[in-house]
Amino acid sequence: MDIDVAHFPDPKHDHRACIDAGLEAAERICQENAARFTPDRRQVLEILLRRHSAAGAYDIIESMDWGDRKRASSVVYRALDFLAENGLVHKLHSRNAFIACSHPDGVHGAQFLICTRCDRIAEIADRKVERGVIAAARVAGFTVRRPMIEIEGLCPHCGG
């Protein structure tokens, strides 16, 4: 299938299923890549999986359970770098924030539908759009590294 359909879950749905599925995928992907899924990396991903909106690094720092440790932004930034390198999160440049990947099983370009009213975000991966962007860039002599598109509008729950 060329399109992974966008999904804006009901605002009252149980996030536990999203969190469990995301963490399970992360554990499998890290195992396949022989990468360490440390407790800090897990916690950062879980914070992002709890929401269907983007979070900035400082929001994540505030949400972390630091226990007896001193808060350290470097811990969160390193975890975000690791999670992005392993395809588990995406950085939304328009928001300078991160969101958990909805389709972590494979390298893909992504299109993000961002609700300007409630800030919920749905990730889609339309292969035709991705191929179109790459082809148009090639004509311009540009080499695409990551074909990400951020699209603003209204989600179905906000009247879109």
Image: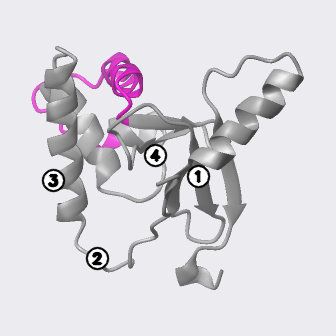
Labelled pair 1, 4 in contact (Cβ < 8 Å)? no
Q: Which residue is mark 3?
A: 20
Q: Nearer the viewer, mark 4 or mark 2?
A: 2
The structure residue drawn at horizontal position 72% and vertical position 30%, both measured from the top left corner, is: 134
Instruction: Name the spot of residue 120 as percent of width and height, x first.
Output: 51, 64
Q: Amino acid at mark 1?
A: Phe
Q: Quadrant of the C terminus?
A: bottom right
Depth check: 143 or 7 in front? Answer: 143
User: Which range of residues does the magenta coloring cover?
Assistant: 62-88
Who comes first in sequence, dot 3 or dot 1? Answer: 3
Who comes first in sequence, dot 4 or dot 2? Answer: 2
Question: Which quadrant of the view contains residue 100?
Answer: top left
Who comes first in sequence, dot 3 or dot 4? Answer: 3
Q: Which residue is mark 2?
A: 13
Number of on-image labels: 4
> Helix, strand or loop at disc 3?
helix
Q: Nearer the viewer, mark 1 or mark 2?
A: 1
Q: Amino acid at mark 2?
A: His
Q: Is residue 61 magenta?
A: no
The tag on residue 55 is 4
